[in-house]
Amino acid sequence: MDVTLVQLRALVALVSTGTFSDAAIDLHVSQASVSRAVQALEAALGFSLVRRTTRSLELTPQGRRVVDHARRILDEVESLRDLTPRASTEVRIGYAWSALGRHTTRFQREWAAEHLEPALSFVQSNTPTAGLAEGGVDVAILRRPVDDPRFDSAPIGTERRFAALASDDPLSRRRSVTLADFAGRTVGIDLRTGTTTADLWAGISAPAAFRDTRHVDDWLTLVAAGQVTGMTSEATAVLHARTGVTFRLVRDAPPIEVLMAWRRASAPPALAALIEKARGLLADPISGTNDRRVGGPFPLSAAGFRPSVGP
């Protein structure tokens, strides 16, 4: 039996992203390469791992067991990175859609000015753990809890929620909207990394339907075309301005908690400083700007942020 790390990474990426095309994007290879790697792994093991249909895929019972083993193996391999010089001179920070929003550049600049090392590298990965489970990053910025004993996390701040609307939508002419304004609409969501669920509308007239999207660009394209209405974090509203899309504050929606997550077995040495720096920026009202991209003329400030308490 000849099993390779490439094959294991392909399987884990496939499970994490849900499609061969998204797995290929995360691994920076072709879709055919992911398919060949999974097929080669099945051939090496002598049984099927994935059931494929025209619309979806699911793991076989054997596949679920193999994925558990594959993740442990990849975690062990990733821990070897801590023995290399890179581990002490660079920290890779994963994110799915928007990193730290408007604070991202300031975070990088101030960190570089205050620390000779480690250097910071932001890495986009649209998986539930923003690349952490796949071994591509050292810490991850997340906006929903991590339900995995391999990882730990700490709150670093909160963000307001914004509606994403087609610019010719009547709601886009308002200064802000409410949850009730979504009633009867189709809402675009990301089941893997998003923070919008039907639970937001408990006791309120709910949207008519939800439509899963796979990437922020796909989501924005659907919003601009008027095919979906979006609900997203303040960070997305700041970083992803798009012609034909208008962002408006959802004034009665609960805030989104922003987390920094890491592997319990191999937390980066600079973790405490990273958490402290991120908390300071997300709690700083001075960094807000009057930005019409997110539906100004109201200021996009962090006045509503509450400082997080201990990890």
Image (tube, rainbow, N blue to C red):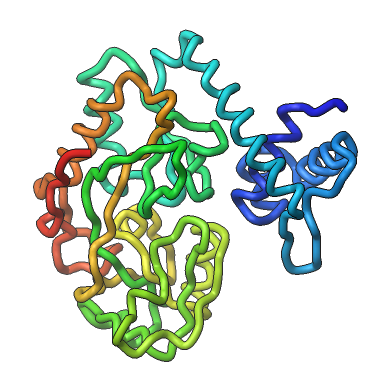
Q: In the image, residue 123 lies at what x, y percent?
A: 47, 36
Q: In the image, residue 86 lies at what x, y percent?
A: 47, 14
For this rendering, which residue is in front, 282 or 242? Answer: 282
Look at 50% across and 50% down and name the residue there. 128
User: Quick check: 102 above or below 211?
Assistant: above
Q: In the image, residue 99 lies at what x, y percent?
A: 37, 45
Look at 24% across and 63% down and name the residue there. 255
For this rendering, which residue is in front, 247 or 139? Answer: 139
How many marks on residues? 0
Quadrant location of the C terminus in the rendered image: top left
User: Quick check: 240 above or below 272?
Assistant: below
Q: In the image, residue 142 lies at what x, y percent?
A: 38, 47
| Quadrant of the rendered image containing residue 160 | bottom left
| Quadrant of the rendered image containing residue 282 | top left
| Quadrant of the rendered image containing residue 173 | bottom left
Name the side, left or right, on which 229 lies relative to 71: left
Name the side, left or right, on which 56 lies relative to 197: right
Name the side, left or right, on which 304 lies relative to 89: left
Quadrant location of the N terminus in the rendered image: top right
User: Quick check: 108 above or below 247?
Assistant: above
Name the side, left or right, on which 253 lies relative to 136: left
Look at 30% across and 26% down and name the residue there. 271
